[in-house]
Image (cartoon, rainbow, N blue to C red):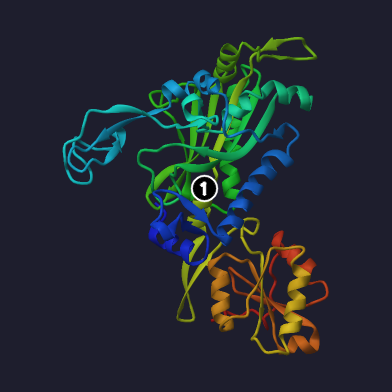
């Protein structure tokens, strides 16, 4: 089994380098709520953009959608969430902590060993009121998933996009679940983001498309740098399938706490469109314009959590190594995910170097997410960039004033190349796209 990274190290790095902070920290925090800092906001945005690029922009059979967080209560009645979106809850009679019954081994409280109550079902949806007067207001729910907004817009999207089946509708958005036992940092929280596609297909082709999407989604993580040995597929047993599912696979990742779900790919059959047709009285079938055949589509659903993906990419990229007797912590993030693409580091704050360093920074900013850092020694600044996963650092030294060249340092192998300032943008762009970092023997050095 591959070695696992300690979660405490990930949490510490995230706080220290501005990836993730405890929410409302100055007031003592709020359980299982987290804020993304400057580096985390960029990483999260890059994960979502990488997903949207491959799922929507690079395909002609998937379109995007952005639906409301609050929806008509009838949506959740038809989808089965009001009746079925529940977890069994037990409470300790001594310390009064509450637990998911299926997460407790034995009949005693995991915290204090006290006696537990009999399980009762607990609905995970957050309720709120819509209207100016609370007594007369309507009860609505914060959505627990983004999928239902897609299903109720199926006819709108098919009509307006003029696309044929198979057709996918993609959405990235916030979801809310009143989890009984959230935890493991950003792995399980009460507020999170989904990246989902509902892929509508002709009945009878659904098994083929399920196999297709299982492979596509597994390969996406590998292409973005996740080690293949840290991923596995797990098919759901018949006794654990959701009430709507015909079949389902999980892409699991070896998180610090063990193998856990990273993404689910489900065959939802025709459950959702059929239920919403009954609940709304609106026919939600599809007619093939060429054959005249009419049917209710089946749905294949690849559903990934943004926050879980961010955590997996951080854990998998984290590394500690020794360089010339000193410890180096580095995030080997894929170039497309790295929050900062280029760090501009003048050798020192010398007044002769600053103008040229600022000029280089201004040249790179329009094309790449760039960081300018002239505080402390050059070695410490390299280490800071390593810890946030910056692929390349550009150093301006006193020779740069004479030869108008700068040094580019590569994050992973620590090799360096010397290139002219004119054309620097093209060199960086090529390296970010995967061009080999071919350092000459003169510049192939290991920096302290």
Residue 280, compared with residue 336, is above or below; it is: above
Viewer-side residue, 121 vs 222: 121
Q: Where in the figure is residue 237, as x and y percent of width and height?
A: 41, 27
Q: Where in the figure is residue 244, as x and y percent of width and height?
A: 49, 21
The residue that appears at 22% across and 28% down in the rendered structure is 118
Which residue is labeled 1 in the image? 307
The residue that appears at 55% across and 31% down in the rendered structure is 132
Q: Is residue 252 left or right of residue 101?
A: right
Q: Is residue 228 left or right of residue 404?
A: left
The residue that appears at 65% across and 12% down in the rendered structure is 282
Residue 299, compared with residue 440, is above or below; it is: above
Tell me which corner region of the image, top left, top right, bottom left or bottom right, holds residue 108: top left
Q: Where in the figure is residue 426, as x and y percent of width and height?
A: 79, 66
Viewer-side residue, 131 vs 75: 131
The residue that appears at 72% across and 33% down in the rendered structure is 63
Residue 429, compared with residue 247, is above or below; it is: below
Outermost residue on the right side: it is 422
Q: Is residue 349 left or right of residue 421?
A: left
| Crowding at mark 1 (Cα within 10 Å: few <14, some 14-19, many 20+) | many
Residue 419 visible in the current orientation: no
Residue 186, compared with residue 445, is above or below; it is: above
Q: Where in the figure is residue 276, as x and y percent of width and height?
A: 58, 17
Tag 1 secondary structure = helix
């Amino acid at each position: 089994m591959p070695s696992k990274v300690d979660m405490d190290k990930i949490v510490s790095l995230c706080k220290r380098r501005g990836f993730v902070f405890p929410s409302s920290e100055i007031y003592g925090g709020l359980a299982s709520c987290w804020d993304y800092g400057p580096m985390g906001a960029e990483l999260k945005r890059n994960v979502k953009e990488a997903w949207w690029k491959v799922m929507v922009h690079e395909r002609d059979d998937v379109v995007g959608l952005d639906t409301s967080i609050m929806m008509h209560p009838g949506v959740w009645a038809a989808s089965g969430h009001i009746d079925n979106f529940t977890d069994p809850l037990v409470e300790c009679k001594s310390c009064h902590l509450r637990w998911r019954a299926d997460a407790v081994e034995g009949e005693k409280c995991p915290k204090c060993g006290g006696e537990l109550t009999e399980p009762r079902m607990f609905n995970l949806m957050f309720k709120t009121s819509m209207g100016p007067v609370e007594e007369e207001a309507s009860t609505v729910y914060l959505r627990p998933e983004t999928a239902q907004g897609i299903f109720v817009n199926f006819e709108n999207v098919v009509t307006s996009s003029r696309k044929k089946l198979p057709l996918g509708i993609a959405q990235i958005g916030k979801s809310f679940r009143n989890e009984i036992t959230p935890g493991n940092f950003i792995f399980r929280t009460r507020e999170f983001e989904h990246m989902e596609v509902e892929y509508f297909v002709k009945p009878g082709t659904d098994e083929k498309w399920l196999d297709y999407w299982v492979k596509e989604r597994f390969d996406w993580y590998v292409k973005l740098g996740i080690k293949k040995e840290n991923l596995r597929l797990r098919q759901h047993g018949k006794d654990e399938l959701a009430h709507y599912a015909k079949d389902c696979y999980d892409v699991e990742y070896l998180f610090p706490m063990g193998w856990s779900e990273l993404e689910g790919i489900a065959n939802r059959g025709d459950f959702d469109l059929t239920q919403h047709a009954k609940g709304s009285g609106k026919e939600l079938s599809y007619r093939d314009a060429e054959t005249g055949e009419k049917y209710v589509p089946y749905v294949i659903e690849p559903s990934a959590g943004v926050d879980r993906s961010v955590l997996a990419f951080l854990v998998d990229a984290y590394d500690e190594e020794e360089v010339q007797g000193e410890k180096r912590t580095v995030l080997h993030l894929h170039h497309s995910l790295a929050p900062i693409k280029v760090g501009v580091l003048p050798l020192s704050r010398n007044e002769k170097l600053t103008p040229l360093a600022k000029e280089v920074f201004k040249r790179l900013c329009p094309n790449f997410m760039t960081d300018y850092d002239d505080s402390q020694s050059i070695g410490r600044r390299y280490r800071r960039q390593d810890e946030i996963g910056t692929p390349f650092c550009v150093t301006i030294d006193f020779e740069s004033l004479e030869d108008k060249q700068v040094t580019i340092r590569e994050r992973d192998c620590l090799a360096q190349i010397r290139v002219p300032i004119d054309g620097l943008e093209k060199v960086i762009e090529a390296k970010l796209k995967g061009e080999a970092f071919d350092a000459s023997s003169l510049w192939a050095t290991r920096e302290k």
